[in-house]
Image (tube, grey):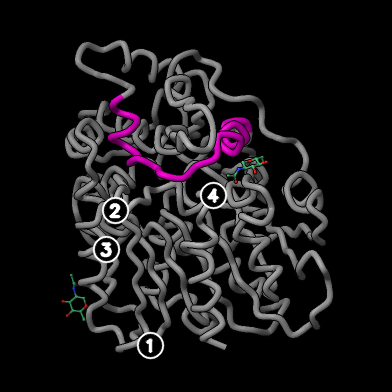
Amino acid sequence: MSVGGLPSFALGCFLLVLAIEPHVAHGSSRSSTLGVGGGGIAAPPATEGICASSVAIHGYKCQEFDVVTQDGYILSVQRIPEGRAGGGGTNKQPVLIQHGVLVDGMTWLLNPPEQDLPLILADNGFDVWIANSRGTQFSRRHTSLDPLNPDFWDWSWDELVAFDLPAMFDFIHGKTGKKIDYVGHSLGTLIALASLSEGRLVDKLQSAVLLSPVAYLSHMTTALGVHAAKAFVGEITTLFGLAEFNPKGEPVANFLQALCAYPGVDCYDLLVALTGKNCCLNVSTVDLFLEREPQSTSTKNMVHLAQTVRDSVLAKYDYGIAGFNMMHYGDVRPPVYNLSNIPRDIPIFLSYGGEDALSDTKDVQRLLDSLKLHDVGKLNVQFIKDYAHADFIMGVNAKDIVYNQVLSFFKNQQ
Ligand SMILES: *[C@@H]1O[C@H](CO)[C@@H](O)[C@H](O)[C@H]1NC(C)=O
Ligand SMILES: *[C@@H]1O[C@H](CO)[C@@H](O)[C@H](O)[C@H]1NC(C)=O
């Protein structure tokens, strides 16, 4: 058993969210202080809800909702029903915005308001909904399980596919009676693709925007992370005896320190190698990010992601033991998500970056290949040479380069 593989991949994702190198043009470079030094990695999370801390302060209306999943998780959801100037009627098109792993919905709201995707969409007449996956700071609730109970963390991205996303779609559709436009970043793209491939969401989805898509991860260009993930043998195990993977917690911090002290491991190079070189981040935003993110997920989710890297196939969580898989799936191998089953007439806009180490261009190519029978004109692809993973959520020029394209794509569907 090589448990070492898991933490190293986890480290990769962890550094992904920490290793945001601000563009020199936007402030002094803080990259040397962003790493994995001291144990105290970030300040405690904001205790107010996302509406109060990040939306209402900019003069937008914002409502908080709870959405309960079929398996009992209580998810926090924000709705921004109109633009800052207000008005614009009631018959608005809903958009659901879904973050990636180890962050929450606040990650979309850290730049100045005129640069934030949810607020841009609201100002352009959309009814905006922001998702927060189970386990993140405002979605650490369950109808019967306490987060201190390891059973609370017994899920991987399979459950985001099967429960979180469908619950969100049902809720928004119930409130608005409309089909939904979707924006996902990183893991938020994978769970939507997997869900669609199983025939979920299809009847309630109008169109999908996939930013920095991850589906296949086998070309992830991170030496250590890749070797580690490949070596990892998936089993039911918990990192450091914890079912929660808390990137701000002491065990993870200690692990990072130990790893960085290891001969031959250069954490500075690792940072760049793992995330790609984000071209366009604002140093103030990075400070805010370090204060408010990253967020917990389950260790099982990190294991599942490591399997996705290692196995180069998109499948459900592998229990690692034939009997266990048999018990869960009625087969010795976990079922595959077949992306060719995604309905070919769903309008998709996919945007990816040339510097993105996590959403490697070869893996994106493979994703595009699995969509090659998609209806002509329904699949729109944008390639941004200078962009890496975090530029898509926090780039100071993301509005000009990406979000304006997203707006016109959505408007074309109406
Ligand atoms: C960076 O963020 C700060 C604080 O929100 C803001 O005042 C400044 O205009 C931003 N810079 C750019 C280039 O967007
Ligand atoms: C995926 O589905 C397509 C048809 O929808 C089929 O031709 C292909 O063999 C399937 N792939 C796998 C791995 O099951």
Mark-to-mark CA distance, 3 and 4? 41 Å
Looking at the image, is mark 4 or mark 1 earlier in the sequence? 1
Tags 3 and 1 in contact by the CB under 8 Å rule?
no
| Residue 11 x/y as whole percent | 36, 31
Magenta-drawn segment? 269-291
Q: Residues within 10 Å of mark 1 (few under 14, many from 20)?
A: some
| Residue 2 x/y as whole percent | 21, 28
Label of residue 335 in the image: 3
Query: For the residue marked with disc 4, what is the amino acid?
Result: Val
Indicate the quadrant containing the N terminus: top left, top right, bottom left or bottom right: top left
Q: Residue at x 69, y 78 (%)?
A: 174
Ligand 1 neighbours mark 2 (CB distance < 8 Å): no
Which of discs 3 and 4 lies nearer the camera? The answer is: 4
Tags 4 and 1 in contact by the CB under 8 Å rule?
no
Looking at the image, is mark 3 or mark 1 earlier in the sequence? 3
To which residue does mark 2 refer? Answer: 354
Which of discs 4 and 2 lies nearer the camera? The answer is: 4
- SS assignment at label 3: loop
- SS assignment at label 2: loop
Mark-to-mark CA distance, 2 and 1? 27 Å
To which residue does mark 1 refer? Answer: 345
Which of discs 4 and 1 lies nearer the camera? The answer is: 4
| Residue 257 x/y as whole percent | 39, 14
Query: For the residue marked with disc 3, what is the amino acid?
Result: Pro
- SS assignment at label 4: loop
Indicate the quadrant containing the C terminus: top left, top right, bottom left or bottom right: bottom right
- SS assignment at label 1: loop
Ligand 1 neighbours mark 4 (CB distance < 8 Å): yes
- Total residue callouts: 4
The dominant secondary structure in magenta is helix
Ligand 2 neighbours mark 3 (CB distance < 8 Å): no
